[in-house]
């Protein structure tokens, strides 16, 4: 069984949307990535840090979905990372109400020995030096290193970000961030410039407008499934990344053709994530539900024009 | 050979984009629709009005692409409709600098007798009463009536618009206009509400984000081809509509499955339109170029996940 190392936040989120609001609930990039990847038959491990206030039941929830939690450090006297945000009516923009780094401030990730030979490493959104620190601990170069990041790191740690970007095979980034990173409005041109920074594969996430995969002039596009109602977009990008990484780890085929399928799986899983608050929908997703929605994706995108 | 009646403006445009600006050049919804539909083997006729200032060479240009111009009235003492606009750097928004209705102000469309039995009618963006006037002149109910419109008519002629929408099979509309027409943010919900207004098929155009086709709970999505550079977006929506209508008229198959192909053809043709100023790119497009780009669309969207 392929091993997948996931680094990212494990956190408390408090979310407000036009449909309601939550108290502190389970959140964090590594949480969403892990839950999403758990839908594939892979041996994954989360590397993160939480405080003494973090409930054991949340760790159990990950373990029960076959996400190893040995690499989640518990700082007994510390408090768990907390993020709070409020979505606007269009669900495409949000205000951050609070960000309390807490134990994340002095986080030194430790990859469990049993996972230092993992084939796939998914570097979730965190300080680029933490992401590089995980890569540095691997016994051998992973077959696939995937990096997710955000504009925040471009603002405060651009050199560190460039350093780690150089060392990964795939970057996942949203459209605005791709533009910020490259200074190019056209996503085609932006993707080419990001290729030149290192990654052979560039995934540009466009939220409700889907995702684009680029590889040396080749392109693939997966729409987001149009939904009657987006209940809570929190974690959709991480869920996409988790599905993408999980599918590739499971199939052990890192070709562009198979990455197309990985993008479709990522989009499929993200379409579930947004249906309920936080991780709720991702906690007990069945294979039948996923297969059913993949069929929806096929119907949504496949056509039959015969060309000579 | 199937007949296609096209009503819409034939006009002068003056366009400014970050790449440059034009003097008065050939424009208008019927022009773009006609040029786009001319890539299919159909007998199409444009119904419109121009002034005495309109050059014969522009009419010849349409005739030479097999668009019948008998239904384009020439008001010798009048001036041709003129629109001028300036695109912002992101190419997704524009300011209208001038709109001179001129001969359009008192336009009474006349469908040539030879086209009153056309199977397909494409009602380009014009006052809804003009669109209804064209439908009223048909000898028999067309097999497919397609309507394009814009927010301007929702603002000043909403009742007339509702009256003609009731009588068409397909509406093409952009995302913001769909939201304005229905008061719904979700495009899935908006499409359902537009179904209830009459049209069995709803096409929502999302510009660089592609187009969605809805039919009673079924959905299909065609992306826009990601381009290095969008040179001039003017006419892209009409070119889409012309490709959609032309393909359906040619194939005489008005099923949802075939409409998927029509949406792909529309997107393919629109991707050419934006590569040069105005109608320039559409004036001498070859079948080989179109087929080549259709292959690009296949590669962009088709994947191979086998489901049990």
Image (cartoon, coloured by chain):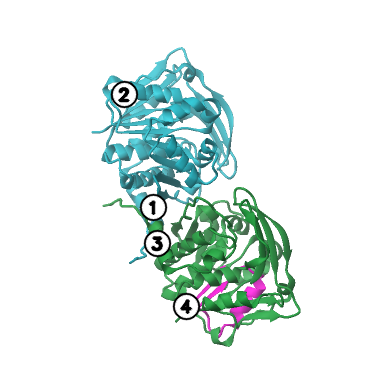
Chain colours: A cyan, B green
Mark 3 belongs to which subunit?
Answer: B
Q: Mark 1 points at which residue?
A: A297
Coordinates of residue B103 in the picture (x, y in percent): 72, 74
Q: Is mark 4 on a helix, strand or loop?
A: loop
Q: Residue at x 40, y 61 (%)?
A: B292
Q: Distance between the residues labelled 4 and 3?
A: 21 Å
Disc 4 with disc 3 on a shared chain: yes
Disc 4 with disc 1 on a shared chain: no
Q: Is mark 1 on a helix, strand or loop?
A: helix
Q: How far apart are marks 1 and 3 (CA)?
A: 25 Å
Q: How far apart are marks 2 and 1 (CA)?
A: 36 Å
Q: Name the residue under label 2.
A: A138
Decide if residue A259 is in sight here: yes
Q: Answer left or right for B2 relative to A245.
A: right
Looking at the image, tell me whether mark 2 or mark 1 is earlier in sequence order: 2
Marks 1, 3: nearer the viewer: 3
Q: Distance between the residues labelled 3 and 2?
A: 45 Å
Q: Mark 4 points at which residue?
A: B42
Disc 1 with disc 3 on a shared chain: no
Coordinates of residue A161 in the picture (x, y in percent): 47, 28
Q: What element carries label 2?
A: loop
Coordinates of residue A28 in the picture (x, y in percent): 45, 29
Q: Depth check: A176 or B39 in front?
A: B39
Q: Assess disc 2: are there few (<14), some (14-19) or many (≥20) residues with their C-alpha within 10 Å of its C-alpha.
A: some
Marks 2, 1: nearer the viewer: 2
Magenta stretch holds residue B137: yes
Q: Distance between the residues labelled 4 and 1?
A: 33 Å
Q: What element carries label 3?
A: helix
Q: Mark 3 points at which residue?
A: B292
């Amino acid at each position: 069984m392929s091993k997948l190392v996931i680094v990212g936040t494990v956190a408390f989120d408090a979310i407000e949307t036009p449909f309601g609001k939550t108290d502190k609930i389970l959140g964090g990039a590594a949480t969403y990535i892990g839950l999403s990847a758990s839908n594939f038959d892979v041996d994954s491990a989360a590397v993160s840090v939480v405080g003494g206030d973090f409930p054991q039941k949340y760790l159990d929830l990950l373990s029960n979905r076959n996400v190893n939690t040995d690499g989640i450090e518990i700082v007994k006297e510390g408090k768990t990372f907390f993020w709070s945000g409020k979505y606007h009516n269009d669900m495409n923009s949000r205000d951050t109400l609070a960000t309390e780094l807490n134990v994340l401030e002095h986080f030194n990730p430790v990859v469990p020995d049993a996972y230092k030979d993992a084939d796939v490493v998914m570097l979730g959104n965190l300080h680029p030096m933490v992401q590089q620190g995980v890569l540095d601990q691997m016994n051998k170069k992973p077959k696939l290193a995937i990096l997710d990041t955000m504009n925040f790191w471009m603002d405060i740690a651009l050199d560190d970000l460039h350093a780690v970007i150089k060392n990964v095979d795939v970057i996942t980034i949203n459209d605005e961030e791709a533009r910020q990173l490259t200074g190019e409005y056209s996503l085609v041109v932006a993707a080419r410039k990001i290729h030149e920074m290192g990654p052979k594969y560039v995934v540009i996430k466009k939220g409700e407008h889907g995702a684009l995969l680029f590889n040396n002039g080749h392109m693939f596009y997966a729409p987001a499934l149009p939904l009657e109602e987006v209940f809570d977009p929190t974690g959709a990008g991480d869920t996409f990344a988790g599905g993408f990484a999980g599918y590739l780890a499971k199939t052990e085929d890192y070709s562009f053709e198979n990455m197309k399928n990985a993008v479709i799986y990522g989009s499929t899983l993200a379409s579930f994530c947004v249906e309920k608050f936080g991780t709720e929908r991702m906690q007990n997703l069945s294979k039948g539900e996923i297969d059913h929605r993949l069929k929806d994706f096929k119907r949504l995108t496949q056509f039959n024009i015969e060309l000579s």
